[in-house]
């Protein structure tokens, strides 16, 4: 029977795996994921970049204008943009030994000025092997 790992142990295990390297892009209330990797230590082994574009104008400047900020369309723009930058900048130096990934989320928290429900989108684009085409998944809101 294997021991069940807690969040800290899982994040540290990923940080200590030198074959995984990537970026975290978070918008709105989603800035918590990357923090776990920094909190446990060894994040420089995993994280090439983190970005949090909380302001809508800033988000549009980076990922292009969009009708909704917390949407599948925005999430896909984030994944496309960040994965392209990551591989353009690091492929020649690390591509033979690295499985690149981008984790992105865009979340709306409880508002004090609107009556919107909280909701969010999360996705990841990743390589299963160095030099392979990326795979990905998107988690749909309920």
Image (cartoon, grey):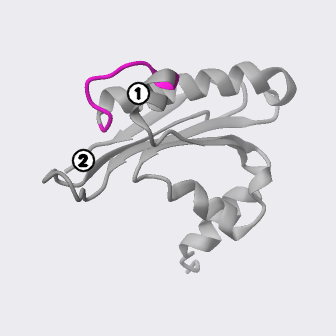
Please name the residue shown 80% across and 49% down the image. Answer: 18
Check the image and name the residue furthest to the left.
Answer: 115
Q: At numbered mark 1, what does the secondary structure look like: helix, strand or loop?
A: helix
Q: Which badge, 1 or 2, is on the more N-terminal residue?
A: 1
Which secondary structure lies at badge 2? loop
Task: Tell me which segment is drawn in magenta.
Answer: 62-70
Please name the residue shown 47% across and 33% down the image: 136
Which is nearer the eye, 21 or 27? 27
Q: Residue at x 59, y 60 (%)?
A: 35
The outermost residue toward the right is 93
Expressed as whole percent of the image width and height from the top left, the position of residue 52 reads 53, 43
Reading the image, the residue beneath label 2 is: 141
Quadrant of the image containing the N terminus: bottom right
Binning the other alpha carbons within 10 Å of mark 2 as few (below 14), some (14 to 19) or many (20 upward) gives few
Residue 78, position as x, y percentages in the image? 47, 30
* Res. 84 image quadrant: top right
Could you tell me what secondary structure mostly forms the magenta stretch? Answer: loop
Quarter of the view holding residue 109: bottom left
Q: Which percent across, then down, holds residue 34?
A: 58, 54
Residue identifier under label 1? 76
For residue 76, above or below residue 103 = above
Magenta-span inclusion, residue 66: yes
Q: Position of residue 133 (x, y in %)?
A: 59, 22
């Amino acid at each position: 029977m294997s021991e069940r790992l807690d969040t800290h142990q899982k994040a540290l295990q990923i940080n200590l795996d030198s074959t995984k390297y990537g970026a975290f892009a978070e918008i709105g209330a989603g800035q918590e994921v990357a923090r776990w990797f920094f909190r446990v230590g060894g994040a420089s082994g995993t994280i090439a970049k983190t970005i949090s574009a909380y302001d809508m104008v800033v988000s549009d400047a980076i990922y292009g204008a969009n009708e909704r900020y917390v949407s599948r369309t925005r999430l896909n723009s984030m994944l496309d943009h960040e994965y392209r930058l990551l591989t353009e900048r690091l492929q020649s130096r690390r591509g033979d030994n690295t499985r690149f990934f981008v984790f992105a989320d865009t979340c709306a928290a409880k508002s004090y000025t609107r009556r919107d429900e909280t909701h969010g989108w999360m996705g990841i684009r990743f390589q299963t092997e160095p030099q392979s085409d990326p795979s990905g998944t998107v988690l749909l809101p309920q």
